[in-house]
Amino acid sequence: MCAPAAPVILDHFNSTNHAYQVLLVSIWELGEVFGPFLLASCSELYGRLPVYHGATVLLILFSVACAASTSLPMLLAFRFLIGMTPPTGTLNAPIIADMFPKEQRGRAISMMQLPGLIGTVAGPTIGSFVTDARGWRWTFWLAAILCGAFECVFAVFYRETYRVRILKDRVEKLKKETANPALRSRYDTGKRTGQVFHEAMIRPFKMLAFSPVIPILGFYAALVYGYLFLILTTVGQVFMDTYRFSERSVGLTYLGIGKKTLSIRSGGKTDDHHRGDSTDATTGTGMMVGILGCRSTLDRYLKHRVSRSGTAEAEDRLPPMVFGGLVLPAGLFMYGWSAATRAHYIVPIVATGVCGFGLTTTTIPASTYLVDAFGIHAASAVAATNALKYALGTVLPLAGPPLYERLGLGWGNSVLGFVALGMVPIPLFLMRFGGRLRKRSSIKVED
């Protein structure tokens, strides 16, 4: 929700530094580079439940601190801390792996990613209206209120799902009931507490360094995610400069809203003949279609492989990723050249929807692949790839304004499209050799 409020925040603090405007959005991602390592390690030590609740409470507190910030550095610092605390990006997919067998995970992970992915584009829409109506501080107050409400519901209904923690608690209970201290969990390695803690803390880093599939897949996911945030941090300015959208109307470019009235600003006056045009497909709509596509194909393809060969590997999750990898550059080409040639504004809006479809059909199969491939350490695997993803999500948007200034919208987005097209062989490579790479890795995986 901060993206459309960034110019207003800079005005409030009397800053004209454009880098701050980008940082206000992307510094969240910098926090998410570091947060997943701690969240994943702690969840594999203490269970999902306490980590999920603790992280959400911290998220609420840091959102309140943002709303009460008295300087731009203070606001940036708490935005960074907010980025460190969301547990959803790291723990949602592993929780699904805890709860569902492999044959049902694709559908469940697709639907669980729906709120987060759609929120990425719905947030700016809400933020633009809240900022216009109540001021920028209310974007953070609203976030804190909504998170608080959801945490109350979550505290009532959520129970521990991590089987390592559940089995450990059962063993401790049986020890007391039977007075037999020799009872052990199947996951108990007999190592000292300090050694177990150390191994859990460094496991995501070891996976990143010694499990080849993680940096390979992570780099591709990072590139796609970075493109999303590049679009989110520049699309508002593109539509205000090229199509003279008002600050309120520009928020509608982030979300599929059907038939809607858009006020186009033209020298301070509203250009009425632009009212009433149909905004059929935007980033939010494209992401929704991609999620539904993954929901219907991921598990179906896995069952098809089992029916033909009697077994299925984690790499059987990757075919939709190839299709998404081809769609994404098409969306980038369409977005860049339609805006550069000043085609009707619906065309670049539709193009952002194509990009959204490409995003979901690459990231969801990647998440499903990781939880299938890395068993009880799925959270560490997700954290390791997320670190790369969020790092590029922080840096790549900074390249957007100078890229467009030097090459223009057409060739600037074409460069991004050609790079994305060059990444398509990555899932093809993993489909062929991923299983061998995992077996040869020094990282041992236990289901």
Image (cartoon, rainbow, N blue to C red):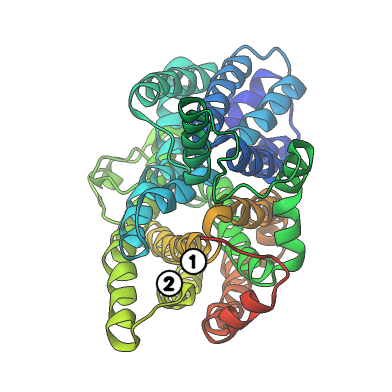
The residue carrying mark 2 is 317
Q: Nearer the viewer, residue 382 or 135?
A: 382
> Can residue 281 be seen here?
yes
Q: Nearer the viewer, residue 417 or 117?
A: 117
Residue shown at the point (33%, 53%) measured from the top left = 108
Q: Earlier in the sequence, mark 2 or mark 1?
A: 2
Q: Nearer the viewer, residue 413 or 153?
A: 153
- Residue 56 spot, x, y in % from top left: 52, 26
Quadrant of res 192: top right
Q: Secondary structure at mark 1?
A: helix
Residue shown at the point (54%, 51%) measured from the top left = 186
Badge 2 local density, few (<14 within 10 Å), some, or many (20+)? many
Quadrant of res 126: top left
Q: Secondary structure at mark 2?
A: helix
Q: Looking at numbered disc 1 in the image, what kind of residue is underneath it?
A: Tyr
User: Compared with residue 172, is residue 187 higher up or lower down, i.e. above or below?
Assistant: below
Q: Looking at numbered disc 2 in the image, what kind of residue is underneath it?
A: Arg
Q: Residue furthest front?
A: 179
User: Compared with residue 65, is residue 393 higher up or lower down, i.e. above or below?
Assistant: below
Residue shown at the point (52%, 59%) measured from the top left = 375
- Residue 431 spot, x, y in % from top left: 51, 82
- Residue 246 spot, x, y in % from top left: 44, 36
Whether pointer 2 and pointer 1 mark residues with C-beta atoms closer than 8 Å, the reply is: yes
The residue carrying mark 1 is 369
Q: Nearer the viewer, residue 410 or 322?
A: 322
Quadrant of res 27: top right
Residue shown at the point (59%, 22%) measured from the top left = 58
Badge 1 local density, few (<14 within 10 Å), some, or many (20+)? many
- Residue 67 spot, x, y in % from top left: 58, 16
